[in-house]
Amino acid sequence: MSATPPVPVRRLLVVGAGIMGSGVAAQAALAGWTVDLYDVQPAFLDRGMAALRRDLEALRQRGGVSAEERDRAEGRVHPALSLDRAREVSVVLEAAPERLELKRGIFKELDRRAGPETLLASNTSSLSITALASATSRPDQVVGIHFFNPVLRMKLVELIPGVRTGPGTLQRARAFAEELGKTVTVSQDAPGFVTSRAMAVLVNEAIWMLHDGVATREDIDQAHKLGFHHPMGPLELADLVGLDTLLSVLERLYTGFRDPKYRACPLLVNLVEAGRLGRKSGQGFYVYGAPGPSPPAAGGPTS
Ligand SMILES: NC(=O)c1ccc[n+]([C@@H]2O[C@H](COP(=O)([O-])OP(=O)(O)OC[C@H]3O[C@@H](n4cnc5c(N)ncnc54)[C@H](O)[C@@H]3O)[C@@H](O)[C@H]2O)c1
């Protein structure tokens, strides 16, 4: 008589409660997962939980869920200021800022704390999964699971196996993303994978056009929306993604390929240095008022 296989634990730890972490937490909770949402300071957790509530309420207003489903999903998300739960979860999704050494430190810590079977995933837009995996003693269990912004609206998840990612890990990542209602593509571990490489070039070129005075920001965005049927213009998209994240992606492409076509426009560098990071700081190419408003209804493909 064969033993019944154990029911997998549907518990997720999200590391980083920013734009993406709060979105993935909401998406997993809607799919019935219990979620621990970790960040380094109470204020960042509060901001992440507020964004999560706002996203779930916007979904209810669009008719995507009932008020009861919204409340149940919210109730499944537990803010956390420590990584203690890493031992109990089946999946960890790291969604911290796009900086390699920061992320490698997180993976090192997760390696120490997570259970032996835990899937260790990164939501990185551009960094090397292989380099993140090398910070652990279990590179076969590390994979890129790249969600898109805004998570509740965007269908795609890009999966990225590192050089040493095991086939079972990739299968588990696929099952996880599909359970959350996403459609999966697989990209190799090259800088920016498929999506961020294409996005960063387009958006950087739009910023160069603004820098060179080719057109106003409004006309650059309008030209892309009406001329190419893009749901949002590239400068609006940059503000949605976060200009710091966009700059990190371009730097990864520039150093990864050693190709000047990825050189970040100085206007982007200046805005980041001025703290104008886009929607999350209240101002980027456009002014938004209070930091962190919801993305526009149209949504759009992002890093
Ligand atoms: N913004 C996008 O459109 C987008 C889309 C897809 C993927 N990504 C990727 O997702 C990741 C997160 O991006 P984001 O836009 O959510 O960034 P964000 O700046 O909105 O959020 C990052 C969060 O990580 C927290 N953090 C900082 N140090 C930390 C640490 N040591 N441990 C845990 N958390 C820490 C910050 O407090 C912040 O809340 C990045 O790798 C980014 O490239 C971003």
Image (cartoon, helix red, strand yellow):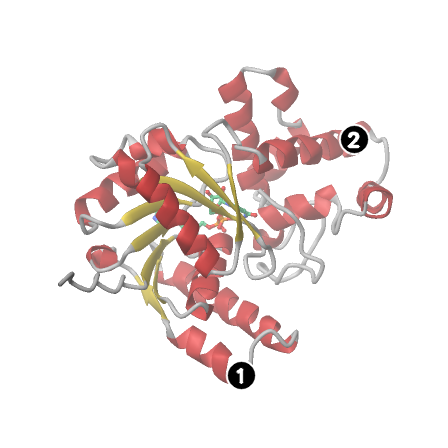
Q: Quadrant of the C terminus?
A: top right
Percent coordinates x, y for residue 203 in the rendering: 69, 36
Name the mark on residue 67: 1
Residue 160 visible: yes
Callout 2 secondary element: helix
The residue furthest left is: 1
Q: Can I make out residue 47 in this image?
A: no
- From the viewer's perspective, is 1 left or right of 51? left
Amino acid type at circle 1 is: Ala
Q: Position of residue 75 (x, y in %)?
A: 39, 76
Q: CA distance from mark 2 to mark 1?
A: 45 Å
Q: Amino acid at mark 2?
A: Met
Compare residues 291 and 5 and report the one nearer the observer. Answer: 5
Q: The N terminus lies in which quarter of the figure?
A: bottom left
Report the front residue among 246 and 271. 246
Residue 14 versus residue 244 in the image, above or below: below
Position above or below: 34 against 130: below
Labelled disc at residue 209:
2
Most foreground residue, 162 or 270: 162
